[in-house]
Each structure stands twice: as C-alpha cells, then as structure tokens.
Amino acid sequence: MLAAVVLGVGIGGFLDGIVIHQLLGWHHMLSGWYPSADMPLMMIGDGLFHLVCLIIVMIGVALLNRRAPLPERVLLGGILAGWGVFNLVEGVVDHQVLGIHHVRPGPDQVAYDLGFLASGVVLLALGALFARRARG
C-alpha cells in the first residue's frame, strides 16, 4: 500500500498545482514570500513544485512495479490516502508554518486554509476506508 500512497502524494500535488495554481490562479508556490514578485519567479517556483511532484509519482510507479498488482480498491484507497497526506502536510507546513502561500489569500484566507486541511482529513479517511474494505 505504501507504493499507492506515494503515488497519491504526487498526484495530489499535481492536482493542487494544476487546479489551484494554474486554472484558478489563487496563488503560486512562492506568492506568500514574494507577494509582489513578477510572474517569471512565480513560474519557476511552480515549475520546481511540479518537478518534485513528477519525481514522487515516478517513485510511486517504480514501487508499484516492484510488487504484485494491488487490488483496485487498495490502489484507489492508497492514492486517496496519499492525496490526503499531501493536503495535510502541505497545508500545515507550507500554509501555516512557513507561510510560503495560502490557498486563497485575502479576507477569508483562514477559511480556505482550514478547508484545505479538512479535505486532507476526508481524503485520508476515505482512502483508509477503501483500502480496509478491500483487504477485509
């Protein structure tokens, strides 16, 4: 299941970067530290973030390749749990501790940050539930 969780961490990072950074444009990876920086710096930060996500996905795929195939529910559960782990770690470390950025800066920034953390808890719980039912 570790391989599926690692894969889920990378996928969760990609979804965060694609949806929140690129499609919604709510923040960029370094926008909390450099709020008035020009777009090339923001693009470099986002690009490095996506590169790390790609490396994590590749590690997850390599780990999956080294073992017998997982049942589909276990794989899905691990991916969901990994996505939840990503949201929790990124939400606590990047948003709260380091202040690299917030989900959506502005007057409701705390609500968005807490919602992001809550989504991590829900994804982690759903992933554990899927994997547990598949094993049982």
Image: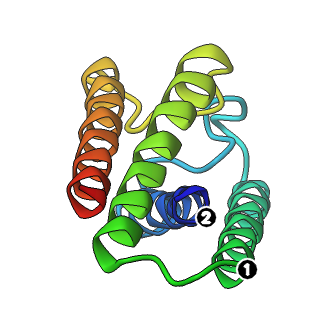
Which residue is more in the foreground, 70 or 4? 70
| Residue 42 % position (x, y) | 70, 55
How does the figure colour the protein chain or chains? rainbow
| Residue 22 % position (x, y) | 48, 67
Q: Residue 33, located in which quarter of the rendered image?
A: top right
Q: Residue 57, located in which quarter of the rendered image?
A: bottom right
Read off the residue under disc 1: 66
> Is 129 displayed left or right of 31 in the figure?
left
Residue at the image point whose x is 71% and y is 72% from the top: 63
Tell me the SS state at disc 2: helix
CA separation, marks 2 and 1?
9 Å
Read off the residue under disc 2: 3
Position of 55 relative to 124 (above/below): below
Q: Any mark on residue 100, and which? A: none
Q: Look at the numbered discs 2 and 1 and tell me whether their residues touch, using CB distance below 8 Å.
A: yes
Residue at the image point whose x is 46% and y is 57% from the top: 16
Tell me the SS state at disc 1: loop
| Residue 91 % position (x, y) | 49, 30
Mark 2 or mark 1, which is nearer to you? 1
- Specify few, some or many for label 2: CA neighbours under 10 Å numbering under 14, 14-19, or 20 or more: many
Q: Residue 136, located in which quarter of the rendered image?
A: bottom left
Q: Amino acid at mark 1?
A: Arg
Position of 2 relative to 35 (above/below): below
Q: Amino acid at mark 2?
A: Ala
| Residue 70 % position (x, y) | 46, 76
Residue at the image point whose x is 61% and y is 30% from the top: 94
